Image (tube, grey):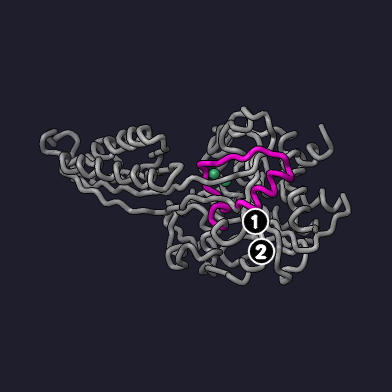
Amino acid sequence: MTDLAARFRQLWDELAPVGRDERSGGYLRYALTEPELWLRAWFREQADRRGMPVHSDGNGSLFAWWGDPLAGDAVLTGSHFDSVPHGGAYDGPLGIVSAFLAVDELRAAGVTPVRPVVVGAFVEEEGARFGVPCLGSRLLTGEIAVDRAAGLRDAAGVSFAEALGERPAGADPALLGRFAAFVELHVEQGRALVELAAPVAVASAIWPHGRWRFDFHGEGNHAGTTRMADRRDPMLTYAFTVLAANKEARLRDAHATVARVAVEPNATNAIPAKVTGWLDARAAEPATLHGLVEAVRAKAAERARRDGTELTLTEESATPLVGFDGGLAKRLTTLLDAPVLPTGAGHDAGVLAAHLPTAMLFVRNPTGVSHSPAESATDADCAAGVTALARVLEELACR
Ligand code: HGY
Ligand code: MN
Ligand code: MN
């Protein structure tokens, strides 16, 4: 094992047990809950060890500075700590651990940046606790209203503002204006790099995608005394909609997932009064995505009429097609001699890309699986990712 791979493993082992569910082997690192607060404290300790002052943007995201925080023209890297329920170890934390190690590599090589290098930890990227993904980067860039963000509530009814301990500060154009570029390193969430036999790739684009909440309203009643013909059962409309989403996505070579459902009253012997399902829809092109969502909506509405139920549809989040900064991506592709890949996964880089030159690096994932305990990466490939990130930071911040 190389020295860098060993140093990666050492840092990685510090995080490995934090928020890990013994039964599933996955992670329960929800934003601003105990495991993620531990990771934020670890972030501050890593920054302190490196003499990097840490600032918050008032929205829950942290930024560790190598250089003058007021100098401007800074190169931001980093990612997020939070996970989906029972998510993998690498999605998010890999970008932060790799960023600190890339700083170490530059310092070990005697390289001093001519503009600041910043390691960021964005809050609530997955949206697993408060329902809106990339909440931290959307707040920093003003892409979500502070009132809406502050009022988002988790399953226990705790608001984001209560979890944060203050009303989020919202957009910070002065801080954003001090960043000249953002480069996020992330584990690949697919198997392209396995097929390409390469450890690192540069991202070309993020598919447009979003989350739509389908509320199906029916009539709660007794499971034993209500004739089938007399029912207005929203579970039927929900079940039909799930199948319709799957079919419409296949017809369009798009992706549709309904993986989260809430039932009221959620009792075995009570016909539901209401069923809520969340559609995660993604497609390579915006028109395909919108066509998919509209087709699912129309099928659900038609079925609701048959079932005597009512549908309300709410768009909870939407991310447009993100084409990463062509100049920056091309520069990094040449620098690293790496392949270029699109992704269907959303990232904070996808939000920041509308505000500053942004790029992503992907590190090979042998299983290709993500948002699952099966997500993986080898120490050697993670070390290759650190080396690549260090070269990128040297290219962008040290010349
Ligand atoms: O859902 C996504 O694509 C990302 O992992 N938040
Ligand atoms: Mn993720
Ligand atoms: Mn991620």
Q: Tag 1's secondary structure?
A: strand
Q: Mark 1 points at which residue?
A: 182
Which residue is depicted at the point 75% across and 51% down?
Answer: 100
Q: Does residue 187 belong to the magenta stretch?
A: no
Q: Tag 2's secondary structure?
A: strand
Q: Where is residue 174 in the image (x, y as percent from the top left)?
A: 62, 72
Please tell me which residue lies in front, 265 or 196: 196
In the picture provided, is 158 more to the left or to the right than 343? Answer: left
Decide if residue 174 is in sight here. Answer: yes
Which residue is depicted at the point 13% across and 36% down?
Answer: 226
Q: Name the residue under label 2.
A: 179
Q: How crowded is mark 2: few (under 14 residues within 10 Å), some or many (20 or more)?
A: many
- Magenta residues, start to end: 326-352
Please tell me which residue lies in front, 118 or 359: 359
Q: Give the image quarter of residue 40.
A: bottom right
Please tell me which residue lies in front, 375 or 364: 364
Which residue is depicted at the point 48% across and 62% down?
Answer: 143
Q: In which quarter of the image is the N terminus?
A: top right
Is 14 placed above or below 368 here?
Answer: below
